[in-house]
Amino acid sequence: MIVVRSEPRLEVLMVQRSNSGMFANALVFPGGMLEQEDSAASWEHLLSHSEPLDPKARSLRISAIREVWEETGILLCDEDETCPPTTPSNEAGAFKALVQSQGLTLDLDAVTPFSNWITPPGAPKRYDTHFFLVHFAGSHRGISDGVETTHLTWQCPHDLLARHEREDIDLLLPTLGNLQLLVRSDTVEGAITDARNRTITPVIPVTEMRDGVPYVAVPAGTPFGNVAMTAARMTKPRKVFK
């Protein structure tokens, strides 16, 4: 989930993954896997949305909101409700129980599809990742869960891209591409409008040679432009964010 706020400039919420696993130390947007409970019919009375959503679209939005809470403690409920700071938990059923106990509603209209990235064929493990954009107007800065993530920060997208260019930090290719889209807007409202006006088509990166150097790049014809990264940089150990 790409969580943005105005402070007063546009800032985006980032978390750093723990130092183990495929995405060790990666600085990413909070998110994770779709769980079976995200598709439960019993969610319906806890949701608000102005237009019908197919089951997959509904489940993906619930999952994105849940993952933000599990990793940061930030609860993205309806803007007319008061969402109290809470302690995150990844125990099965904990998120739904919290929403029910607080009498809250998840506003699925506020969760805007942003992009869809699919791992190229031949990779050891493939992901079909849906990114969403949401505005967080609350005062809670969030907290790292200390398990899946070790650090949490709000950053200006321009600053993140500049640090990646200097190799102070190492972003994943989808994170890099999504930030490149995000910086086209100076405001939260502009970013949301741009996303809502954009047709979301799956992006499958390709490997290509540039002056004898292998790169992983976004194919031509996507909104992301010339987003690419050397294959060597994608596989080297990532720096810890400071």
Image (cartoon, helix red, strand yellow):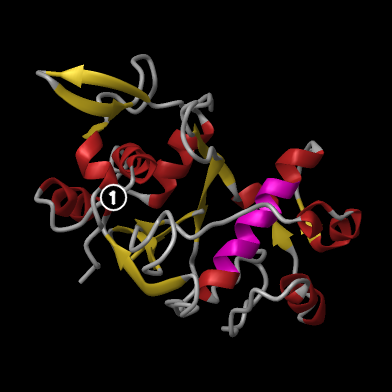
The quadrant of the rendering that contains the C terminus is bottom left
Q: Is residue 18 magenta?
A: no
Considering only vertical position in the picture, is 213 above or below 38? above
Q: Secondary structure at mark 1?
A: loop
137 or 146, nearer to the observer: 146
Across and down, in percent, residue 49 comes to: 75, 48
62 or 237, nearer to the observer: 237
Quarter-of-image position of residue 228: top left
Q: At 71% across and 72% down in the image, what residue appears? A: 95
Q: Which amino acid type is shown beneath numbered disc 1? A: Leu
Across and down, in percent, residue 125 comes to: 52, 41
Q: Which residues are magenta?
A: 59-69
Give the residue number, with chain letter if any, for mark 1: 171
Across and down, in percent, residue 188 comes to: 40, 51
Considering only vertical position in the picture, is 3 above or below 177? below
Q: At 29% across and 37% down in the image, what residue appears? A: 184
Few, some or many C-alpha atoms within 10 Å of disc 1 (few <14, some 14-19, many ≥20)?
many
169 or 29, nearer to the observer: 169
Q: At 23% across and 50% down in the image, what residue appears? A: 236
Quarter-of-image position of residue 113: top right
The main secondary structure of the magenta stretch is: helix
89 or 221, nearer to the observer: 89
Side (left or right) of 136 relative to 89: left
Considering only vertical position in the picture, is 50 above or below 141? above
